[in-house]
Image (cartoon, coloured by chain):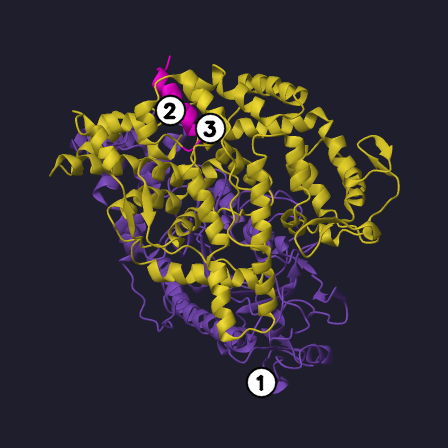
Amino acid sequence: MHVNRRKFIQTTGLATAAMFLPRFLKAHESNAAINSEKILVIIQLTGGNDGLNTVVPYEDGLYYNARPNIAIKKDDVFKLNTELGLHPNMKGFKNLFDNGKMSLINNVGYPEPDRSHFRSMDIWHTASNSNEYKTTGWLGRYLDERCGNCDKPTQVLEIDDTLSLALKGNNVKGLALKDARRLYGTTIDPFINQLTKQHEVGNHHHDNVEYLYKTLAETVSSAEYIYKTTKIFQSVAAYPNHQFGKSMKTISELIISGVNTNVYYVSLGSFDTHFNQQKRQGDLLQQLSETVEVFMNDLKKNGRANDVLLMTFSEFGRRVQENASNGTDHGTANQVFLIGNNLKKTGVYNNPPNLSDLDEGDLKFSVDFKNIYATLLKKWLNTDEQNILGNKYNYLEFI
Amino acid sequence: MISEKEKIKHLYARAGFGMSIKQWQSQNNFTKSLDAIFQTKQYKQLESVTLSEVQAAKEKMKSMTKADVKDLKQLMKSNVFELNNMWMSEMINSEAQLQEKMALFWHGHFACRSVNPYFDQQYLDIIRKNALGSFAVLLKEVSKTPAMLQFLNNQQNKKDHPNENFAREVMELFTLGRGNYIEEDIKEAARAFTGFGFDKTGEFKFKAQQHDFGVKYFLGKTGNFSGDDILQIILEKKECAYFITKKIYHFFVNDISDDSDETIIQQLANQFYQSNYDIRSLMKSIFSSNWFYDEKNIGVKIKSPVELIAGMFRIIPTDFENKQSIIFIQRTLGQILLNPPNVAGWPGGRNWIDSSSLLFRMRLPQIVYYDKDLDIEPKEETPESKMQAQQMKMADEFVKKIASKKLTATSDWSGITKYFLNENDITNEIASVVLAKKADAVALKTVKSHLDTSAKQNEIKSAMIHLLSLPEYQLC
């Protein structure tokens, strides 16, 4: 390969400036390490979504007893089976459910749950136990594992201005962008550009200054790659006109354009509904449901629906008992939605929450979220999940 | 061998937040600079809120009227973020640079977030006041702050229902580190810490009726131990001195630590132990050693966001129109004072750097000094309490308001302009002041090709701004 390339250049006399660039600047010439075309989209419901008013146990008297003011009426839910029904604003999810595109996992959580937003989110991001502190995220470590030799961090993208802990690995970190054009605009600033292009890679690759220049070069080349690639495709699907709708449209355009990203990460919130929960949660669930449906249809229309699996999660669910302000306080276990064309086990995956067996007023978890991560990493992203998670977790059967 | 001036620069970069122009001008004698660093300054407590204000606010929250909300907002405006700003201001302006730098270290070590601004204030006072004192005293005092007791759930640690969180973190993160105790020790220590609590006035209170007075077996000893006894037994372990010394070494010297570093750490740890945990003498040993000024220790550490911000504003005195601005920067770069990610503190090092944070660090000087658009919106953080909700709402409103706009600031360039006015090679001269190491020729050339040469003072300003934007400036 290298010989051929050199020969080609020698014989044609075509020596371009690119030849002299360090390896990481030639990022997009070869399609390195990750070959899998499977794509995972993660939607973080920030703030602790109230799971019991998302998937309602509409036949359970205990639910109605605990929530005299904010319970969702049996007649209003979209019934999924004889026990559970979706929030009335989630028509899109109901359609996906009916079409066999959804697997609903109940009671997802972890042992010794933490009820602080920050800490619990930390635990979900780093895939740690509740008494350990990890400084890297599970998707960052996925990058470390799969992308030790990749030249660009575009395999894992977050649609935001700043990067979440989940996407930070030891050696490789994901890329955050809200708008490909704007990021590109920043990186073509003449000063930044000249600095990057003219930097000569030093001998001490482990030096922090080299690390900074390498990060900068990767950022510049990734921004260019993504911007130029996404110019190819612009979605005409009717995404709702809110930030989440825009973000999902961006993801769709990136996927359909063929950007080499395997994992997309996006957040919606805040679901922290201590007061007057109904309106706020209703609006957010509406945003979630309508957007995801448009998104899945968009992918289908463009022939990519089979390649994409989508997961939602929240740092915790909320208390079973409503509080005095028509809201709910911080709780524990919660449902996770998996959405895609290739699910092995669709519908309601496991038993619904048991409201008669609570832990200090909160739901008990029956599925550790790390089992879901392990399943996604191994069976969908085809990678060695044990290194990433630091432990062996049994796989679930949804894919 | 590095020059005397470079030694002073390195000392100030690590023992403080970097040199101001005035210091650069006046300090030429290393021994004198070292002495100055260790001179005791009058201690000033930072106060942004009183206990009665917080209690009144809590009371009001139970039944809020519109007028109350207004009062409350006013109060919140003047507390946690105010406290953050006040501390930032000490880091930037105080002569007691080592005290503030050391306090920042302890803040990351005894990492704590409180939902109560008054508790935050007490906690900050303890880590600042004891920053260079005795680690034994610091440990014992921090362990009795309502902020920490609440953060680590010790209010729920009762005789009949022990909660091990506090005991676990004290041993794992604050004193010994993993491998120097077993699970059984945590259980026994937790029993000893039962009853460590606080009252409504924010004072430590030993609640005897919740305390387990039984015999405990802890780290090979048997006795009727109290919480204080447990801390004392821990302090008697040499492993504790080693654990703290190593962390200090990583923070102040280098975070790589090879074999030669390891030998030094051992020696320092022995000394620290012998001195009964005297922090000042430990720091003196570090900063007066020869190895501290070795090439391999200079310009190798990635500045934390707070170090970066403080250092920049020490060079160029800057006033923001809105006090939230510094918090906006902290938030975007991932380090908000009094808001560490968890009890393990900020991981630091390369963890500070990703594509977004690096680009923002490099754009920051232009945003502040050339009034360029911010064009970035940091993530919202979900408040953990009603009290926090009010503060964060304001912060979020500010973020939303300015995310696509500017951070309006006035800065004082007079000292800088005056000092560099007669230099021939302005870029080189400024580089030798603000960059930790001799800058890469290519980077300097790039800076020079972007200078505003319309007037000498513009040239100085643009050289400074571009130098502060370099990847090299992220290091100290």
Pointer 1: residues within 10 angstroms few (<14), some, or many (20+)? Answer: few
- Residue bearing the label numbered 2: B9
> Do the residues indicated by labels 3 and 1 lie within the same chain of the protein?
no
Q: Residue at x 27, y 33 (%)?
A: A21
- Residue bearing the label numbered 1: A76
On screen, residue B470 versus residue B71, left or right, reads: left
Up the image or down, B157 lies above or below B18; here it is: below
The answer to whether mark 1 and mark 2 are in CB contact below 8 A is: no
Q: In the image, which disc is placed on residue B15?
A: 3
Quadrant in which the C terminus of chain B is drawn: top left
Quadrant in which the N terminus of chain B is drawn: top left
Locate residue A69: give its quadrant.
Answer: bottom right
Chain B: its colour in the image is yellow
Pick whichever, B406 or A246, lies toward us.
B406
Q: Provide the secondary structure element on which disc 3 rests.
A: helix
Label count reads: 3
Q: Which residues are magenta?
A: B1-17
Up the image or down, A233 lies above or below A384; here it is: below
Return the x and y of residue A197 as percentages of the image width and height: 25, 36
Return the x and y of residue A317 as percentages of the image width and height: 62, 65
Pointer 3: residues within 10 angstroms few (<14), some, or many (20+)? Answer: many
Up the image or down, A89 lies above or below B184; here it is: below
Q: Residue furthest bottom?
A: A75
Which chain: purple? A
Mark nearer the viewer, 1 or 2: 2
How far apart are the alpha carbons under marks 1 and 2? 69 Å
Pick whichever, B317 or B39, lies toward us.
B39
